[in-house]
Amino acid sequence: MASGTPLPLKILTEQFAKLPGIGMKTAGRLAYHVMRMDPAEAESFAEAITNVHDSIHECKVCMSFTDKDICGICSDLNRDASTICVVEYPKDIQSFEATNEYHGTYHVLHGLMSPMDGVGADDLRITELLSRVTVGDNAISEVIMATSPTVEGEATAIYIAKLLKPFGVKVTRLALGIPVGASLEYTDSVTLFRALQNRNEL
């Protein structure tokens, strides 16, 4: 039975559905919204997508995304270059910057070690991190592992910590525990255990 959806519109819907968190219904609405755009607006939309791929690349220092050789954070002389916060993806940097409390630099791994998914240490930007610690002009005093509190995140953090240990660099992990406003009644045992481990003196 023939579909009532024109092939180009169907293809556009399928492309939108490839985006994270976008189901087929939402993808369909987005595709029809694009169809309602005037030609100039649709062309600008398509050009913006193309420009991202043409002009954005990895920062030579931290491996985050930038349109310059070195990103704005790495080139900021007011940042504490002796501290590196290791994150999974470039978008994670925005979460830390929003706190206005962290003034060090970053390093983006572009993923986590996950043997089940065929992602090993060589697929991440770990070599570049080691180079920053051992070869960089600035002496690195601390590396903060800010990977997710998942099996993959923990394994990646531990792996990198072992690699850094011979260089005498202090390696820390983000404190994990009970979020503000949460009830103990609904807190799982793993989270509660980590909260006990990371307890602070009052």
Image (tube, grey):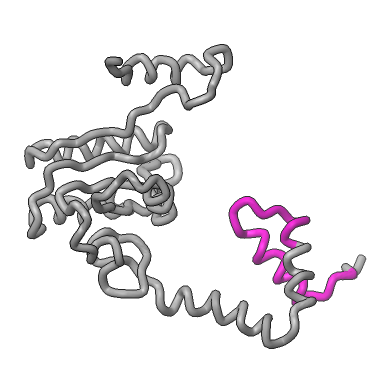
Q: Main secondary structure of the magenta part?
A: helix
Give 159 or 119, whichever is nearer the viewer.
159
Residue 6 lies, with reference to residue 143, above or below; the image says below
Question: How many numbered callouts?
Answer: 0
Q: Could you say which quadrant of the image residue 13 lies in?
A: bottom right
Q: Residue at x 22, y 55 (%)?
A: 79
Q: Residue at x 67, y 54 (%)?
A: 22
Q: Quadrant of the N terminus?
A: bottom right
Q: Could you say which quadrant of the image residue 200 lies in?
A: top left
Give 132 or 8, whichever is nearer the viewer.
132
Q: Is residue 38 left or right of residue 22?
A: right
Q: Is residue 124 left or right of residue 129?
A: right
Q: Is residue 169 magenta?
A: no
Give 6 or 54, whichever is nearer the viewer.
54
Residue lying farthest bottom?
Answer: 40
The percent position of residue 21, horizontal first and vertical second, equals 63, 51
The percent position of residue 40, horizontal first and vertical second, equals 68, 87
In this picture, which residue range is highlighted in magenta? 4-27
Q: Quadrant of the C terminus?
A: top left
The percent position of residue 157, horizontal first and vertical second, equals 29, 37
Q: Residue at x 32, y 20 (%)?
A: 198
Residue 116 lies, with reference to residue 180, above or below; the image says below
Residue 45 lies, with reference to residue 139, above or below; the image says below
